[in-house]
Image (cartoon, helix red, strand yellow):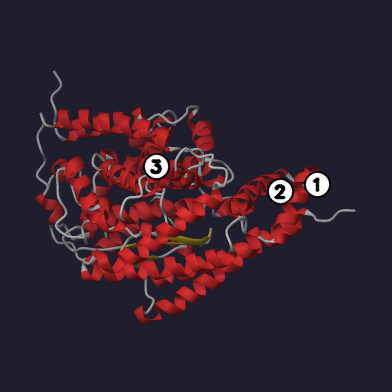
Amino acid sequence: MVKYVEEDLLALLKEISLLEENQALLGWDALTGMPTDSSDFRAELLSYLGGKSFELMTGPKMTDMLNYFRQNPTILSKLGNQLVAHESKKVKLNTNIPNEDFMEYQRLTSKAQDAWAKARQNNDYAIYAPYLEKIIEYKKKFIKLWDPQNQAKTLYDVLLDQFEPGLTVAKLDVIFNEVKTGLQKIQNKLSYGQKPDDRIMHREVPIAQQRELALTLAQKLGYKLSKGRLDDTIHPFMTAMNRNDARITTRWATNDYQMAVLGVLHEAGHGLFEQNIAAKFDYTPFAKDMAMSIHESQSLFNEIIIGRSKSYWQNEFITLNAVTNDTFADVSFNEWYRAWMTTKPTLIRTEADPLTYPLHIIIRYEIEKAIFNDDFNIKDLPALWNAKYQEYLGILPENDLVGILQDIHWAGGDFGYFPSYALGHLYAAQFYHTMQKTIDFDQVYASGDYQAIFDWRKEHVWQYGASKTPQEILKQATGEELNPQYWLELQDAIYTDVYQVVIN
């Protein structure tokens, strides 16, 4: 007698997905327009919904269903068996966590994000620190439940694996050391070049013009406003409820239009991924559980590969001048582009150029290792943060606002997440290297029709959602394992040109 059929699994997954869509919408609202006094009520609601979805995900019905399907795989389609494998891993990971702990953790992270916002408003880490400490305590407790046999070599390995399956401190140390060494060589090389004059980057551009420019560029790359929207926030992010509702946010400064333009391109890259997942994955975890490195590769492809490309801007410089009412009409394209590409140490990660950005990630990676592998005192984190910035970038944060309070990720419990940003850079460059074999980017940019780039990314990356691992997508698309040299070689070529380094 057949106990379950595939439709039963899909129905349960849809119920979980609908609860998660509600959580995502509430989370987006909390960071874009929710009244400040409603934070406690919102925390309760998110905790309730999170508890319900967690209960369904790890409860007896799901467990029984998965056991049955593992014993009877032939009654499922290929997709059904993939979903069973995916959910089995998730259930195994979370089945030991008591539901009340998960609900309290959801409540805590919601309150922590409000505390982070207040700490930023008051430039005071002490407001946020108690919440951060509790989150870390929960994470350490959960790690023991996620890895009851102590199979991971370090506590932090358990967190890394959740964002990038198979990634460990040992592997990441090798990758980051290669990147650090390569960056040092490039920076030494640029010291013999001509530093651009970047003062024109701080000319005043009204926010309305910035918004028009950023949205025009994002839509040309394929981001659909019929399936998304752009809102203001403290820290830019993208939230997707489903493939027809992927919302992006940014922040603005009238004398720093580059921040908003590149920020919107970045978040639109995330949105492009979400808007173009295959419809067959609707209401399944394959539409939600993408590893962050592959997601970041697509946002960074927009921001770094395209948004920093000379040939791209040779075409879009006309758009820039048209939208900004010729604010830069007295500047030649080459003069403008060199200013656009200036590299220098900055305190804010999201405003960093490609050559310094990975160092921001390495700093956070080393701090997270200290927290989980060395039990570093949470009260002393600002001092460690500042010391790392002095060591790696040669600059010292003057306050918490431009230091440890700049990122929201830890308030949401996202430890092990930051390395995905650096890996995203490397993935994006490797995709670009392969794409150049079949796409003439200079010709595509000159035409103003970017459909060929859109189509390649949809075919080789976006459509799969979370049904493949990042490593599988990368290997299938490029024929190789991850190779950081493609990124280093690309940056070396770009900045050698920008800084007019003469090679004898």
Rendered image: mark on residue 398: none
| Residue type pointed to by label 2 | Gly
Q: Position of residue 281 (x, y in %)?
A: 62, 52
Label 3: element kind: helix
Quadrant hosting residue 403: bottom left
* Residue at 21% over, 67% down: 123
| Residue type pointed to by label 1 | Ile
* Residue at 48% over, 40% down: 456
* Residue at 31% over, 47% down: 367
Marked residue nearer the N-terminal end (2 or 1): 1
Rendered image: mark on residue 424: 3
Q: Position of residue 11 (x, y in %)?
A: 70, 61
* Residue at 35% over, 45% down: 374
Residue 18 visible in the shown view? no
Q: Position of residue 394 (x, y in %)?
A: 14, 43
| Residue type pointed to by label 3 | Gly
